[in-house]
Image: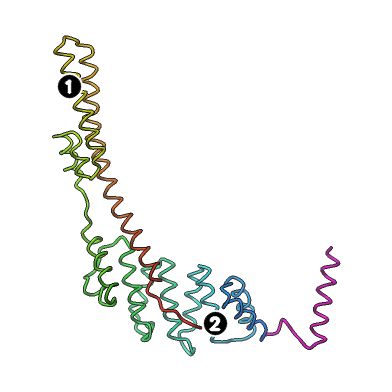
């Protein structure tokens, strides 16, 4: 089997060279790499471009190689290669945008902001896109938001309206007060759950605690002390359990607000391709 494969390979190479075709030439490496890149096969295009760059320097191939690293999610490597094309390259502006988008997707937000302060790193052509990415880091990070007039100024029309909505929901989240919820349940069983919007649980808690309390009183009035004591204990457990459960539910509610908002924000960014332009290298 191995002999047959070697024979076929030898025959293929022999025919190729006899016809003056060198499939492993620099030019064919580039052509095949470009074909793979334009077909969306970024893993194999990356391999072809890497081999090409060991033999010859080329602006287009270097920037495309950086883009393949980005597309296969090797973001820190992509950032390094984009940065290497900052100067004396016909793709300086694209390289600067690629550098910042790589830092963004790598989650290196501190590095992003630090390098944003270096003016010569900013592309005048894609400055608006880079600043939008910077704005998005604030929405994704668990840090206080800066002044809205600064971070929203790079968005237009519908995008600015949506980003303003996210800003308000992140800056002043509609949390529920856990202490208030617990106190409400202490005063009227189930009312704390209703405050949290859990109407079914609230009504169930009210009926269960009320019914157990009624049975306890009724049995004591009928001189059934043992049954009265049992129902009293059950009523007490229902009452205390409802208060405790309401406090936990309030905490869960507040965590859910943050988690759901983060998901919604990330989905919106992804849906809009992170406001990145389509670039043809």
In the image, is 146 to the left or to the right of 119?
left
Residue 152 at x, y percent in the picture: 26, 73
The one nearer the camera, 37 or 204, is: 204
Residue 261, given in percent of the width and then of the height, sits at 31, 58
Q: Position of residue 236 (x, y in %)?
A: 21, 25
Asked if the magenta segment contains residue 270, the reply would be no
Q: Which residues are magenta?
A: 1-26
Image point (28%, 53%), residue name:
257
* Residue 37, image x, y percentages: 57, 77
Measured in 3D between alpha carbons, the distance from the residue under mark 1 to the one under mark 2, in whole angstroms, is 80 Å
* Number of marks in picture: 2
What residue is shown at x 37% (from left), y 63% (from top)?
A: 266
Question: Where does label 1 land, which residue?
Answer: 214
Q: Earlier in the sequence, mark 1 or mark 2?
A: 2
Quadrant assignment, res 182: top left
Q: Residue at x 17, y 22 (%)?
A: 214
Q: Is residue 22 magenta?
A: yes
Q: Residues within 10 Å of mark 2 (few under 14, many from 20)?
A: many
**The residue tagged with tag 1: helix, strand or loop?**
helix
For residue 54, what is the image quadrant?
bottom right
The residue singled out by tag 2 in the image is: 62
Label 2's element?
A: helix
**Residue 111 is drawn in which quadrant?**
bottom left
Residue sitting at 32 percent across and 55 percent down? Answer: 260
Mark 1 or mark 2: which is in front? 1
């Amino acid at each position: 089997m191995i002999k047959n494969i070697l024979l076929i390979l030898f025959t293929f190479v022999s025919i190729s060279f006899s016809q003056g075709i060198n499939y492993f030439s620099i030019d064919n490496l580039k052509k095949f790499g470009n074909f793979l890149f334009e077909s969306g096969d970024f893993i194999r295009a990356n391999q072809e471009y890497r081999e090409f760059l060991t033999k010859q320097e080329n602006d287009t191939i270097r920037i495309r190689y950086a883009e393949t690293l980005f597309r296969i999610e090797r973001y820190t490597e992509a950032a390094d290669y984009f940065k290497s094309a900052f100067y004396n390259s016909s793709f300086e502006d694209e390289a600067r945008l690629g550098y910042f988008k790589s830092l963004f997707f790598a989650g290196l937000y501190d590095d992003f902001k630090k390098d944003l302060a270096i003016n010569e790193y900013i592309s005048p052509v894609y400055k608006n896109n880079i600043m939008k990415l910077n704005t998005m880091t604030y929405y994704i990070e668990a840090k206080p938001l800066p002044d809205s007039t600064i971070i929203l100024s790079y968005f237009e029309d519908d995008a600015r309206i949506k980003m303003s909505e996210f800003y308000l929901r992140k800056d002043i989240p509609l949390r529920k007060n856990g202490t208030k919820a617990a106190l409400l349940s202490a005063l009227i069983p189930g009312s704390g759950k209703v405050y949290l919007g859990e109407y079914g649980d609230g009504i169930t808690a009210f009926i269960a605690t009320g019914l157990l309390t009624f049975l306890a009183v009724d049995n004591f009035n009928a001189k059934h002390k043992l049954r009265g004591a049992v129902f009293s204990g059950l009523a007490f457990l229902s009452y205390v359990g409802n208060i405790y459960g309401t406090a936990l539910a309030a905490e869960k509610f507040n965590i859910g607000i943050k988690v759901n908002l983060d998901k919604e924000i990330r989905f919106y960014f992804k849906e809009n391709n992170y406001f990145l332009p389509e670039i043809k290298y």
